[in-house]
Structures are given as C-alpha cells and as structure tokens.
C-alpha cells in the first residue's frame, strides 16, 4: 500500500526547539572498522524532530506518553493547508467544518527553527470544543517560538488531546488520509519521538 512518511530523520542536523539539546549519535562499535558488530549510542531530547507531546508535558498530574490511547494517534485524519498563513485563527477553522473525532494536521511550510505557523489560542480552543482526537503541525511548536504561556499547548493538553510536532508535510496535499503515529513507549515520559505515516483514505470515507 502506498504511504507517505511524514517523519523527520533523526541526526545531528535535526532541527531542535531553541534551547533544547541537539541529537548526538555516537558509533561505539563499527563493523566497517573490524568490530564484531555495529552499535550506536543516542542522546536526544524527548521532543526532537517528529514527536508527540503528552499532557504530562505541562501538567504534573497529566498522562505520560506510555499511557496515551494510541487510537487517538491512529485513524482517519485531515491535512489542512495553512502555508499562506502565520497564525491559524478561529475564522479559518470555522470555515473547515471540523468534525468531532477528527485528527487534524496543519501544513504551515515550516523550513527551519524560525519558520512555520502556529495556532492562535482561540483556534486551539475551537479544536477542543469540537473534540478532535489529535492535533499535528509541521513547525516545532503549536505555539509561537519562545512563547512563555504556551496557550495552545495548555488548551489541547488540558483536554487530553495529544500534540504532534515537527511533522514533515512539504509536498503533502490537503485532504483526507489515515494517520499512523507511534511514539516511542518511554516509561513515565512527557513526550517521545515518533514515526508517523499517512495512508490514502479509503474510497467513500468521510
């Protein structure tokens, strides 16, 4: 079956949120050097590249990443093209007729650590009111970079809605798909890197 990989590769050049540690991949053993096998050691933030934020990210009593219901991250989804916008506002979402249970991904044309759009607080509140299952974005945060109050994060995570950030949506057309997103099962962690793919939506699917 045809699929679209919307995950970023992880390596020293992977973009990180300003102030977060970069990825380090250290080759401890290397079969090419004559070692019996190749073994690498990884060091990275739980929020590196394509990743999922769990409610614990902001709330001490929130669910950790290993406690999330994976059905919230796997199933029908819609990609919305907001590449011509900065902030995604409520008026835009009202025109999209968001349905309860949808998983909504925003393609913002993010290119670097400073680029990409974000959700205005009233847009995040609109998504919560419409009981979406998950929200994703291709920029490094659903909030403006450097935001101190993280209002979009607050709204979504307080409602138990997981957030996918750092998606790779360049070249992905707006429309309906099936999302498969599996964050690493890091015990008690507030987030985790994830592998995410899109599959064509079955004919006749809403």
Image (tube, rainbow, N blue to C red):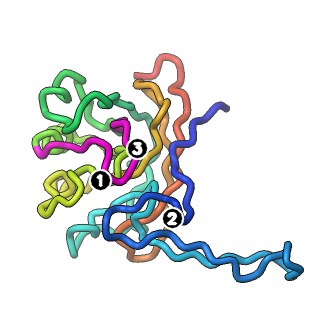
Foreground residue, 125 or 28?
28
Q: Nearer the viewer, mark 3 or mark 1?
A: 3
**Residue highlighted by disc 2:** 184
Q: Secondary structure at mark 1?
A: loop
Q: Are marks 3 and 1 in contact (CB under 8 Å)?
A: no
Q: Secondary structure at mark 2?
A: loop
Q: Position of residue 198 (x, y in %)?
A: 52, 37
Mark before the other along the chain sequence, 3 or 2:
3
Foreground residue, 15 or 175?
15
Mark before the other along the chain sequence, 3 or 1:
3
**Residue highlighted by disc 1:** 141
Please provide the residue range marked out in magenta: 105-121
Quarter of the image for residue 5 reads top right
Q: Nearer the viewer, mark 3 or mark 2?
A: 3
Q: Are marks 2 and 1 in contact (CB under 8 Å)?
A: no
Q: Secondary structure at mark 3?
A: loop
**Residue highlighted by disc 3:** 111
Local packing at callout 3 (Cα closer than 10 Å; few below 14, some 14-19, many 20+) is: some
Q: Is residue 57 magenta?
A: no
Determine the CA span between mark 2 and mark 1: 19 Å
Mark before the other along the chain sequence, 2 or 1:
1
Residue at the location (31% across, 51% down)? 114
Determine the CA span between mark 3 and mark 2: 25 Å
Local packing at callout 1 (Cα closer than 10 Å; few below 14, some 14-19, many 20+) is: many
């Amino acid at each position: 079956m045809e699929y679209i990989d919307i995950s970023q590769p992880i390596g020293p050049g992977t973009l990180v949120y300003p102030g977060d540690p970069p990825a380090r991949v250290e080759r401890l053993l290397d079969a090419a050097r004559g070692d019996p096998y190749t073994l690498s050691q990884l060091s990275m933030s739980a929020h590196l590249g394509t990743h999922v934020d769990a409610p614990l990210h902001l709330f001490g009593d929130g669910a950790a990443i290993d406690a999330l219901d994976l059905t919230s991250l796997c199933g029908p989804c819609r990609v919305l093209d907001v590449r011509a916008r900065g902030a995604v506002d409520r008026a835009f979402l009202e025109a999209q007729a968001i349905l309860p249970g949808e998983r909504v991904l925003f393609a913002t044309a993010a290119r670097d650590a400073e680029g990409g759009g974000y959700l205005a607080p009233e847009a995040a509140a609109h998504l919560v009111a419409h009981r979406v299952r998950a929200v994703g974005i291709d920029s490094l945060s659903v909030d403006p970079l450097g935001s101190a109050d993280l209002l979009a994060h607050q709204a979504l995570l307080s409602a138990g809605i997981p957030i996918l950030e750092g998606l790779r949506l360049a070249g992905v057309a707006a429309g309906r798909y099936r999302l498969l997103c599996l964050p690493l099962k890091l015990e008690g962690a507030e987030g985790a890197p994830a592998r995410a793919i899109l599959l064509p939506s079955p004919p006749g699917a809403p």
